[in-house]
Image: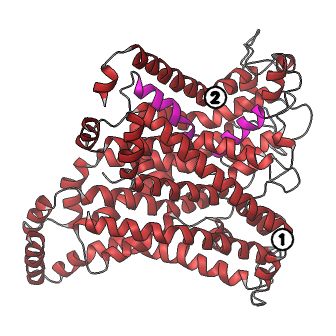
C-alpha cells in the first residue's frame, strides 16, 4: 500500500495533504469540547455572557474551580463537589481491588483447573456483562435494605463488585487461556497446591492483565451514574451524581463556569488514567470483541 | 493429549492423598462458588424477581397482588413508553450507523502510515474515558442556544444561523446522537484499526499487482475481511444505546417534556420517582428482551468462532 503513496507524483502529494488536513480537522472536532470546557471554567461569569465559546479569557481566574470544589450547591447543600470526589474514591478503590482479585482467581480456576461444567460456569457468569442494569435495580434496592446497606458506600461497593466480577473474570480467563499449561501441570505433579501455583506461576506473568482490569473497573465505577443515583443518599453520593445535581440546581444565576469546573473535576481522574495508560484502556475496551 | 494425560495423573495422585487430595480437587470449585452464587442470585434471581414484580400491581412499594400481564398491556397503550421506544430506534439506529461510518473512515485514513498516528488516536479516543454525565454537561453547554455554538456562529456574522435542537422537542433526540457519537466513535475507530492491522499484507499486495486502486482494494478486499469487527462493533454500540441513561439525564433530562425519554429513563422515572414499580418492572423486562434479541446471535457466533479458532 505504501509503495503507491511513496511514489510522490503531484497528485499523490495533494492527496497526502488532504489526508492530513482531514485527520487534523477531525482531531480538533474531538478536542474542542474539552478545550471549551477548560476555557469556560477559568472565565469570570461576565465574560461568559459577553464573549463567545472560543474567546480566550481576559482575566483568567481559578475562582470557579474553588467554588465548584468547596462552595457550589448540589441540591440542598452548598459544599461543592470536593467531598463527593473523595466519596467516589472511597467507593472505587475497594470495589476495584475486590473485583480484580476475585476475577483473577476465577479466571485461573476456570482455565488451569478445568472441571466438568467449568465452561458452563463461565458462560453463566459472562451473561452478567450484558444485562441492562434496569432489570436488577428494584430487587437490588430491596436486598440492600435487608442487608442494612441502603444508601451506604459499602452498599455501592457491593453493587459494583457484584456486577464487575463478570468483566474481570472475562479478562483474566481470556488472558490465562493463552498462558501455557505445561508449567502448571508440572507443578501439580510436584504436589504444589492451588494457591501456591497461582502465586508462583500465574501471578508473576499477570501484570498486563491486572493493569487492564484495574483500569477498566476504575473507569466503569468512577463513571457510573445509574447505581450511584439509585442507591446513595446525600452524604454517600459519587461525584457523577453530585455533578448532575450541581448543574441542575436552579437557585440563583446559572454559573456556567462553575459547572464546567465541576465537570472537569469529575472527569480528571479517568482522563489522567487514560493519558498515562491509554494502551491498556484500549485493550480493556476491545477485550473479547476482537480476536487476539 | 498431554493435558488429559497429566489430568489423569493428578487425579490418581490426589486419590492417594485423600482426604487432603480431595480438598485439592475441590478448591477450584470452592473458589468459584461465591461468584457463582452471586451471579445466580444477583443476576438470574433478580431477573426473575423483576419479572415477578412486573406481574403485580406494585406502586410505591413492591406488593404481590398478581395482575397477570396487565402492566405490559398498560405499556402498550402508554404514549410516553412509545415515545421512549421510538426514540431508542431513532437514537440507536443513527448512533450505530454514524459511529460505524466515522470509525471505519478514521481508521482507514489513520492506516496510511501517518506521522503522529499515536497522538491522533489518543485524541479520537479520549472521550470514551469520560463519564456520560460529563459528556452531557459539556454538550448541554455547547448546544445552549443563547450562549453556545449558535451564539458563536451568529457572532461571526451569520445572524440567522439557528441551532436550537436542545430546546426543540422535534430535534432534541438528535442532540443525544451528536454527543454519543462524539463519545463513542473513537472507540469504533480503535476496533477497526486493530482489525486492519490484523489483515495479511500479502492479500493487499496481490490486489495491487492486479492493478486495483486503493479505494477499490478497501471496498472489495479489506472491508469484507473486517466483517467480524463490524459485527462486534454493532453489538457493543447497540448495547450502549439500549443502556443509555446518564447521557439523557445530563443532556436533556428527558425533555423538552418527555420528548427525549429512552426506555432506560422511562424505567427509572416510573420505578423510582413516580411510584409505578409494576409498570417500571415491565419496561425493564422489555429492555432485557431487546438486549437478548441482540445478544443471543452475538454470543452464539463468539462461542462458535472460539471453538473453531
Residue A173 location (% of width, % of height): 32, 61
| Side (left or right) of B261 relative to A219 | right
Mark 1 residue element: loop
Mark 2 residue element: helix
Subunit of mark 1?
B
Residue A110 is at least partly visible in this image = no
Residue A174 is at least partly visible in this image = yes
Q: Residues within 10 Å of mark 1 (few under 14, many from 20)?
A: some
Is B134 included in the stretch rendered in magenta? Answer: yes
**Quadrant that contains the N terminus of chain B:** bottom left
**Quadrant that contains the C terminus of chain B:** bottom left
Residues tagged 2 and 1 counted as in contact (Cβ below 8 A): no
Number of numbered markers? 2
The circle on residue A23 is none
Q: Nearer the viewer, residue B260 or B135?
A: B260
Residue A56 location (% of width, % of height): 72, 13
Q: Which residue is pictured at 33% across the width and 54% down the height?
A: A291
Q: Residues within 10 Å of mark 2 (few under 14, many from 20)?
A: some
Residue matched to label 1: B275
Prevailing secondary structure class for the magenta stretch in the rendered image: helix
Quarter-wise, where is residue A47 in the image? Answer: top right
Above/below status of B95 relative to B207: below
The part of the chain drawn in magenta is B116-144
Quarter-wise, where is residue A28 in the image? Answer: top right
Q: Which residue is pictured at 49% across the width and 63% down the height?
A: A129
Tell me the mark number nearer the camera, choosing from 2 and 1.
2
Residue matched to label 2: A34
Amino acid at each position: 500500500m505504501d509503495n503507491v503513496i511513496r511514489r510522490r507524483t503531484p497528485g499523490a502529494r495533494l492527496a497526502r495533504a488532504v489526508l492530513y488536513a482531514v485527520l487534523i480537522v477531525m482531531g480538533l472536532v474531538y478536542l474542542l469540547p474539552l478545550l471549551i470546557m477548560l476555557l469556560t471554567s477559568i472565565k469570570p461569569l461576565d465574560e461568559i455572557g459577553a464573549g463567545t465559546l472560543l474567546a480566550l479569557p481576559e482575566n483568567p481566574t481559578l475562582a470557579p474551580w474553588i467554588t465548584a470544589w468547596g462552595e457550589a450547591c448540589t441540591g440542598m447543600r452548598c459544599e461543592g463537589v470536593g467531598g463527593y470526589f473523595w466519596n467516589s474514591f472511597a467507593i472505587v478503590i475497594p470495589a476495584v481491588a475486590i473485583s480484580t482479585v476475585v476475577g483473577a482467581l476465577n479466571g485461573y480456576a476456570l482455565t488451569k483447573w478445568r472441571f466438568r461444567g467449568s465452561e458452563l460456569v463461565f458462560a453463566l457468569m459472562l451473561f452478567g456483562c450484558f444485562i441492562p442494569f434496569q432489570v436488577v435495580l428494584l430487587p437490588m434496592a430491596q436486598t440492600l435494605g435487608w442487608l442494612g446497606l441502603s444508601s451506604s458506600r459499602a452498599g455501592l461497593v457491593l453493587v459494583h463488585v457484584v456486577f464487575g466480577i463478570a468483566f474481570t473474570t472475562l479478562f483474566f480467563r481470556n488472558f490465562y487461556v493463552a498462558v501455557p499449561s505445561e508449567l502448571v501441570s508440572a507443578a501439580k505433579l510436584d504436589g504444589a497446591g492451588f494457591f501456591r501455583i497461582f502465586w508462583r506461576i500465574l501471578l508473576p506473568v499477570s501484570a498486563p492483565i491486572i493493569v487492564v482490569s484495574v483500569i477498566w473497573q476504575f473507569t466503569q465505577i468512577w463513571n457510573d451514574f445509574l447505581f450511584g443515583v439509585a442507591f446513595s443518599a446525600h452524604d454517600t453520593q459519587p461525584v457523577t451524581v453530585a455533578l448532575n445535581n450541581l448543574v441542575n440546581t436552579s437557585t440563583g444565576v446559572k454559573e456556567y463556569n462553575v459547572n464546567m469546573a465541576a465537570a472537569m473535576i469529575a472527569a480528571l481522574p479517568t482522563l489522567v488514567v487514560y493519558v498515562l495508560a491509554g494502551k491498556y484502556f484500549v485493550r480493556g475496551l476491545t477485550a473479547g470483541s476482537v480476536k487476539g | 493429549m498431554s493435558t488429559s494425560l497429566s489430568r489423569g495423573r493428578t487425579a490418581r495422585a490426589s486419590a492417594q492423598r485423600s482426604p487432603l487430595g480431595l480438598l485439592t480437587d475441590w478448591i477450584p470449585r470452592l473458589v468459584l462458588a461465591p461468584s457463582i452464587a452471586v451471579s445466580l442470585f444477583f443476576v438470574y434471581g433478580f431477573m426473575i424477581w423483576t419479572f415477578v414484580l412486573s406481574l403485580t400491581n406494585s406502586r410505591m412499594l413492591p406488593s404481590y397482588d398478581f395482575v397477570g400481564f396487565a402492566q405490559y398491556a398498560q405499556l402498550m397503550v402508554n404514549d410516553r413508553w412509545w415515545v421512549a421506544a421510538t426514540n431508542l430506534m431513532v437514537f440507536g439506529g443513527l448512533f450505530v450507523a454514524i459511529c460505524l461510518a466515522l470509525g471505519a473512515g478514521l481508521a482507514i485514513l489513520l492506516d496510511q502510515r501517518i506521522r503522529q498516528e499515536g497522538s491522533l488516536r489518543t485524541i479520537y479516543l479520549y472521550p470514551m474515558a469520560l463519564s456520560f454525565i460529563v459528556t452531557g454537561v459539556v454538550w448541554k453547554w455547547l448546544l445552549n442556544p443563547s450562549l453556545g455554538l449558535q451564539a458563536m456562529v451568529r457572532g461571526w456574522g451569520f445572524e440567522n444561523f439557528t441551532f436550537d435542537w436542545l430546546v426543540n422537542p422535534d430535534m432534541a433526540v438528535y442532540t443525544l446522537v451528536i454527543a454519543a457519537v462524539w463519545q463513542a466513535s473513537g472507540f469504533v475507530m480503535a476496533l477497526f484499526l486493530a482489525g486492519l492491522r490484523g489483515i495479511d499484507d500479502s492479500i493487499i499486495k496481490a490486489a495491487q499487482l492486479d492493478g486495483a486502486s486503493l479505494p477499490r482494494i478497501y471496498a472489495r478486499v479489506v472491508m469484507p475481511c473486517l466483517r467480524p469487527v463490524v459485527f462486534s462493533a454493532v453489538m457493543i454500540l447497540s448495547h450502549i444505546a439500549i443502556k443509555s441513561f446518564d447521557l439523557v439525564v445530563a443532556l436533556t433530562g428527558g425533555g423538552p417534556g418527555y420528548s427525549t425519554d429512552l426506555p432506560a429513563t422511562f424505567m427509572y422515572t416510573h420505578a423510582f420517582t413516580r411510584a409505578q414499580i409494576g409498570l417500571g418492572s415491565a419496561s425493564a423486562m422489555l429492555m432485557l428482551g431487546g438486549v437478548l434479541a441482540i445478544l443471543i446471535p452475538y454470543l452464539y457466533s463468539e462461542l462458535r468462532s472460539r471453538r473453531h479458532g
